[in-house]
Amino acid sequence: MSTSERAFRDPAPAPATIGRPPDYLHESHTLRSWFLTTDHKRIALLYLAAITAFFVVGAIAAGLIRLSLVVPNGEIFTNDTYNKIFTVHGVVMVWFFLIPSIPATFGNFLIPLMIGARDLAFPRLNLLSWYIFVGGALFTLADLIIGGVDTGWTFYAPFSTTFSNTYVIPALIGVIIVGFSSILTGLNFVVTIHAMRAPGMTWFRMPIFVWTHYATSLIFLLATPVITIALILLLMERAFGIGVFDPALGGDPVLFEHLFWFYSHPAVYIMVLPGMGVISEIVPAFAQKRIFGYRFIAYATIGLASITFVVWGHHMFVNGIGTGAAVVFSVLSFAVAVPSAVKVYNWTATIYKGRIRLQTPMLYAMGYIGLFVLGGLTGLFLATLAIDEHVHGTYFVVAHFHYIMVGGTMLAFLGGLHFWWPKFTGRLYPEAWGRISAFLIFIGFNVTFFPQFLLGYLGMPRRYHDYPPEFQLLNILSSAGATILAAGYLFPMVYLIWSLWFGERASANPWGARGLEWTTPSPPPAHNFARQPIVDFEPYAYPDPPADDDGAAHVG
Amino acid sequence: MNPQQQALSLWPSAASAAATSADHLIWSFTALTLVLVVPIFLGIAWFALRYRDGKTANRRLRHGHDRMIELGWMIIPFVLTLIFFVWGMRLFVDQKLPPANAMRIEAIGRQWMWKFEHPGGQAEINDLHVPAGQPVLINMISQDVIHGLYVPALRIQMETLPGRYTQLWFNADRVGTYRLLCSEFCGTDHSTMVGLLYVMTPADYAAWLARSHHGERIVSAGRRLFASYGCAGCHDGGTVAAPALAGLYGQVAANGAYVDDTYLRSAILDPDSTRVPGQPAVMPPFKGVVSEDDLFRLIAYIKSLDPAAEASR
């Protein structure tokens, strides 16, 4: 048994505080040491604070949307106010929460730890990314304060360029700026993963979490510049009347749809792939079993990141696109089912004959799998041309992408937050509260969004403030679910903060998990590892159960 | 049945055979979805209980068929779902091929109303009356932003674009009143850009046409505009060698482009965009001069020109 492997099997008890080098949280305490830090772990926490703030903004907007939709006649807000609220919800949740959520926090914190590096390749660039992110976000906040924007997060031209009477330009500038943060983070991750893996950390010894972040980073690098360019063109048309998209100025509005979705479909995978990485870490840890089909999952990750670039047209089946193009985009979209199925079936197979502990992260992971499967298969409904012709632009689409983004990304984010919370903070969260909130979120989510599939079939278009009365009961049900969901979100915000001071102290590896991040103390020292790790083991090296397994608990 | 009288409905009514076909597709795909997801859900729940930590269970793993298993769950669900790709594609393609006898209705979307004009010149706002059992083709364009014409009871919609015609056809064969909505966000009053589709018996429709106000038939209005905008001066003979328009529609023009409604629209508004390089720029642009309403009338007139009749003149 090699040294590093022994470190896995028998994690050294955390030495007494005296004489132990201070961890990254306690190394220094000044504000300056946080706001000018180049430590990837501290930057990750800066991101965590920023995106949590944006999540709260987006969630309040979501609550106002659900409040408004309790009544069919749009009596609670004016039309313009409602349009601004859903735009805030979309813009903030997509660009300021979902896209950076897992990569910028967990990715930042964990990639160096998982591959045995001291930091990311470009620590100062990493800090710059955070400042760019916050700077861009401030433009958007300023927009809210001066009066808001009503274009929807999709910014379709020529409405956004010529017809909207709201503050489109600051919102565009904010999103454009934030795009550079994504690009720099993606660049940092790609270089780090290529160049800074510990000795022995071959590509196929990397955790799936690292694979998914590698794929995500490639999408950041290849797709984000397209939206940046598209939004700059939008800005030039709105600000200077340079005709690109508005036919009255000689432009083409369908061109904007193409450019927008060429980024925004891959952006879905920016949100989804990191979540898949989180689930691929949680499931083996709580099944105490090697992940099933490691290589297939790794290839499926790259497969998803590739296919995602050739399916954008499925957002445009009803805009007069040629029939041949529609058919090609439809069948390519169906191909997404193959790598997605690989993931889901492999997670399920990992649970089979494992040693399952149903703690909070595992509850989130199981919820994730269920919701991702439903979200994914309803995506195939939308890829089916004749079905899309009916439910395009309706609440069916809204339900579908919330199953993917909330059911998927958000559940993975919360699962990962609980899973790595001991590593981030050195404290354990209260398990009972964790389980309660996981159940609340799962139930609240389904009560909120399942009725929206039915509303979509019935023909309720999205972004409708004033809707036909026959949709009211389902909308009330959906709003009721949103209150359960809100409670589910509030609990972790309270008890996780509580645990920072009062939570039980965590050992280096409280879950008996495999992976280099669990070999270093919780929280890790500023330089991550006391000695350069040398990797001579496979990923997810959980032991096979003994032949005469009697079910007695084995501590990982 | 008035759509406004239901407190809760769980499935929309279907106004056409195509809508019923789409429902069959949706229900069948839902059945396949259940076949695919129920085993996963039950499997996860069963495994989590059966193999819970501390429980006695046979956890011995048999390796050896992993690759076959992986290939199996990659290929089998994909092939099953491809059935629905083909099915959905066939319905969609049918939806793109309007029958030759379709009655044509011109539609204009603008913030925030729909305007429909029947061939006889009867115009209506937001509501649309059509005869049951008669294929109807809606040729639509937007005056401002992108809208979307959506009739849930027909299970179809089409974006209404500025600067370009898009089309939708249906054969509503069930008499009734159905909702007609804007499905693409278009600004402040997007959610009030709605109306009703009245599918009437042919006799009722004829009676409705007769009692509706109308000016002239679309084609004759087009002929009048063709003269009043001065088009006739060059295109109906005259001293300038303007291209003959009769029979042009549906052909390939001298510049190599296919002549459809959008092409004729561009040629009128911005003749430079369709001019053959090297030809003199004689025709003035009509951008900002001819309204969308007059454009579809002019185009209807140009399409109605019979080359044989022109030749014999």
Image (cartoon, rainbow, N blue to C red):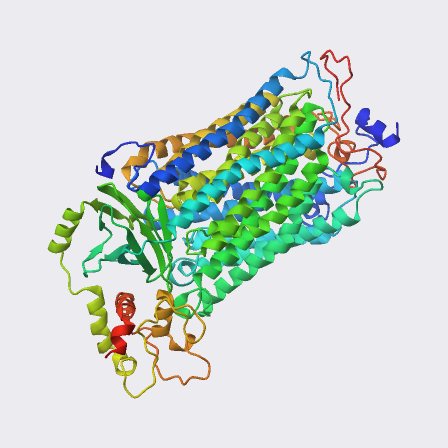
Left/right of residue A395 with respect to residue A101 in the rendered view = left
Q: Where is residue B217 in the image (x, y as percent from the top left)?
A: 18, 64
**As drawn, which residue projects farthest toward the left?**
B211
Q: Is A246 above or below relative to A506?
A: below
Residue found 52% across the figure and 60% down from its top: A231
- Res A398 quadrant in image: top left
**As drawn, which residue projects farthest toward the bottom?**
B239
Q: Position of residue A482 (x, y in %)?
A: 43, 33
Q: Position of residue A316 (x, y in %)?
A: 46, 52
Quarter of the N terminus of chain A within the rendering:
top right
Q: Which of A123 and B117 is in front in this view?
A: B117
Q: Nearer the viewer, residue A122 or A551?
A: A551
Q: Position of residue A224 (x, y in %)?
A: 59, 55
Residue found 45% across the figure and 28% down from its top: A484
Would residue A379 be visible to someone looking at this image?
A: no
Q: Nearer the viewer, residue A327 or A524?
A: A327
Left/right of residue A232 with respect to residue B100 in the rendered view = right
Q: Is A360 above or below relative to B188?
A: above
Residue found 79% across the figure and 32% down from its top: A519
Quarter of the C terminus of chain A within the rendering:
top right
Left/right of residue B69 with respect to residue B40 in the rendered view = right
Residue found 48% across the figure and 52% down from its top: A326
Would residue A521 be visible to someone looking at this image?
A: yes
Q: Nearer the viewer, residue B225 or A82?
A: B225
